[in-house]
Amino acid sequence: MTNPLLAPWDTPFGLPPYDRIEDDHWMPAAEAVIAEARVAVEAIAANPEPPSFDNTIAALEMSDEGIGRVFGAFYAVASADSTPARQSLQRDFAPMLSAYTSWVIGNRALFERIDTLWQSRETLDLDPEAARVLMLTHRRFVRAGARLEGAQAERMAEIRARLSVLGTQFSQNLLADEAGWTMPLSPEALAPLPAGLRSAAKSAGGENGPVITLSRSLVVPFLQYSPDRALRKKAFEAWTARGMNGGETDNRAIAAETLRLREERAKLLGHDDYAAWKLETEMAGDPQSVRELLHAVWDPARAAAEADAEIYEEMLRADGHEGPLEPWDWRYYAEARRRAEHEIDDGTLKPYLQLDRMIEAAFSVAHRLFGIEVREIEAPLYHPDARAFEITRAGKHLAVFIGDWFARPSKRSGAWCTTMRQQHRMGGQEVRPLVLNVCNFAKPDAGEPALLSFDDARTLFHEFGHALHQMLSDVTWESISGTSVARDFVELPSQLFEHWLEVPQVLREFATHAETGAPMPEALMEKMLAAANFDQGFATVEQTASAIVDLEFHCGPAPADPMQRQAELLEEIRMPRAIAMRHATPHFAHVFSGDGYAAGYYSYLWSEMMDADAFEAFRETGDPFDPDTARRLEAHVLSRGGSEEAGVLYERFRGATPSVEALLKGRGLAA
């Protein structure tokens, strides 16, 4: 029978034919498309004609189209709906893809053609986009080790292969720890919880009765609302112990080996350490610039958190508990204080924050800003919970957007945006993207509406901001399309889009009660918005601590014992004892499941320096939907991908790059 992955995809908008794909189809398809790409690259390298942009750079851009198609479809489902078979395939694919990449980078004839073009770039008469792609291609080869020879080149290939295996194993260990733990709730433990959390716990447990899992959408609200301190401790310790429970799923040795190999790779490439190598091409430029940002944020955040801790410790003692405030206490007493000071809680807010209405709100904001239209479509998707939408503008197809919003044991934790296909116009085509948002919101009982916390709704808007960056992309070359930008710039569109969730006219229209349909009362809305920066000391400390540890792990010699080094770093910065890092080393997937955010977790804060300033551009007009500002945002940021340096794009939109003061002011931490 024909492998559906290798046959033409006669599906709506060229979506992967998930209704016909079996797990046995993936490996033959992967082998076939990698073989095709090798033939294409060999032809480029062996071309007897002198190198030109078209016969070398453009040809290389189009050489791996099949790899992108098959692996884009695979990794979308592997992360969001894992099975033992798909996990096994991930472990097999990691070294296969690494070997292919090493072979391409190590093809001397190919690099000589690229290098010849780079050396003669001034004579090529390239348009700005093509010139940018040439520069990025040459830089990518050099930074990957194309100039290495002999034993050094072989060692680089070995390191790349081993890192890909380690990253895959780290992710799978984390998923196993998360899926393998539940905490049953007795009727007495269930009764004090808000109705929405009780419903989610019952849904998670099914026939086995209500449970708390290690999904953030369950464990965080449990820590906020459960008055049972012993159960809070049990849940918190399980949540923070992911990846360090001993046995086959323990990630500590993986983290240590990963850091050693990254350091070795950087030194092979002539850098002092991995952070120096990684940050060379980011907006920050070097580790010291990142340190300055992180410590400028750390000091006011820590001071705010310590002041809050004194209040929460008094509340703890008033409840009859002895001993200091512990990490499993913080969220409970912070929520109690929020209820007291702002007269709101999630139980009051959630009925007004229905998932379907928040999805509509995100679509509506995008329509008002950028003129897009959305219609839900029927399409073959990988899971019944996923939904597909066609995105159009002025009757023209722009993209397909897929939303997969509910938590399940087969889905890795967190929230993310990815593509099954990126926008480009290579080879005279007009290829539009297939974009996927994945979240982990608690799934309600059948027939009940899904209700979100305000943080959940913010996450939904955040990921849709990433999706817009992909869907509004308008460039020729796939390698600079959409979110193919500096890591510390990629979070700008997503964090900026969050601001529209707080626009009162958006809430008035879409924050409607799940039972009555009534809009959120103005007084409640004002309280919710007034509390938006509540507990920012805690939030900023747990995030910034993770960023500091990540950076210092990659500066200087790799630590022999990352857990010991983590403890030393937290002591050096005087981490408040009742706050844990947002991502401790054994479950720091951003950093150890791949290289994307390694030495780069600071990028959320770096982008936040810009997002508050960018939204201020709308505020200055008096209209959060000002059409001229929206057009500038799309023209200079959302549509341009990586076609120019990130700083140039932002300054073209806003005039200048803001300072850290914008970040502190946005979080309510400015003096």
Image (spheres, helix red, strand yellow):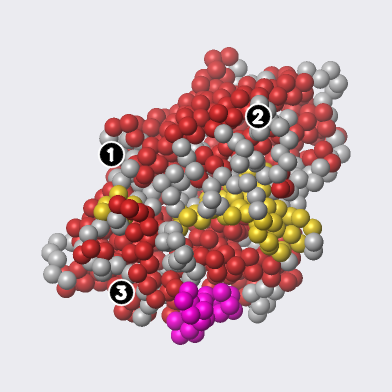
Quick check: is 346 in the magenta stretch? no
Q: Amino acid at mark 3?
A: Arg
Measured as percent of width and height from the top left, residue 27 is found at 57, 27
| 340 horizontally vs 428: left or right | left
Q: Amino acid at mark 2?
A: Asn
Q: How far is mark 3 from mark 2, CA to CA?
A: 58 Å
User: Would you say residue 36 is visible in this rendering?
Assistant: yes
| 644 horizontally vs 246: left or right | right
Query: Who comes first in sequence, dot 2 or dot 1?
Result: 2
Q: Is residue 320 above or below residue 377?
A: below
Q: Which residue is mark 2?
A: 3
Query: Who comes first in sequence, dot 3 or dot 2?
Result: 2
Q: Amino acid at mark 1?
A: Asn
- How many C-alpha atoms fall within 10 Å of the one at disc 1: few (<14), some, or many (≥20)? some
User: Would you say residue 94 is visible in this rendering?
Assistant: no
Measured as percent of width and height from the top left, residue 257 is found at 39, 29
250 and 77: which one is in front? 77
Measured as percent of width and height from the top left, residue 310 is found at 24, 69
Q: Which residue is mark 1?
A: 245
The residue mark sitting in front, 3 or 1, is 1
In magenta, the rendered stretch is: 505-526
Q: Is residue 230 above or below residue 288?
A: below
Q: Quadrant of the N terminus?
A: top right
Query: Who comes first in sequence, dot 3 or dot 1?
Result: 1
Quick check: is 521 in the magenta stretch? yes
Give the numbered dot on residue 337: 3
